[in-house]
Image (tube, rainbow, N blue to C red):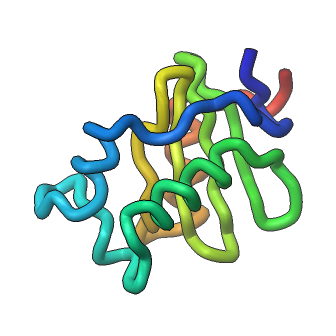
Amino acid sequence: MSSAIGANPDLPGFTSKNLEKHFGSGFNSDHSLQYPGFTKEQYAQRAHNLVKSEVCGNILGYKATNGAIVRFDESTNDFVKGTSTGIKTMFKPDEGTQYFERQMLRDGGMTDD
């Protein structure tokens, strides 16, 4: 079972298909331009490290009512959402912490286990 605020070392990373969609695809879901100098592998590793991390310091997070784990790093403006089947997305929201807070309300986010 995943933790709303604790570390989640067992959460998987991107599936190959989803990574292709989110990094370098040229579609609306392509976030590669937000990560200049990153390779696809570095992007995937950053997302995986963040989604597995515990909430503390600059890392905010919650668990959505559908079980998704969300983490937001205020220092890098990275927003990541993952589930038991893999990371769904990572990007830098234009509105930073305000975006995170709106998503938390929309997702019915919980900050306790």
Compared across the picture, whether 15 is left or right of 66 comes to: left
Residue 74: horizontal and vertical position, in percent? 67, 69
At a point 12% along the width and 63% down the height, the residue shown is 26
The answer to whether residue 25 is left or right of residue 13 is left
Q: Nearer the viewer, residue 99 or 81?
A: 81
In the displayed structure, 79 sits above or below 53; it is below
Classify the position of the C terminus by image quarter: top right
Up/down of 37 relative to 88, above or below: below
**Residue 58 image position (x, y, % from top left):** 78, 66
Q: Farthest residue in the left direction?
A: 26
> Residue drawn at (82%, 49%), measured in percent from left and top?
55
Residue 47 in percent (x, y) is at 54, 54
Does 106 sit above or below residue 92?
Answer: above
Q: In which quarter of the image is residue 109?
A: top right
| Residue 38 coordinates in the image, percent (x, y) | 43, 76
| Point 69% across, 37% down: residue | 62
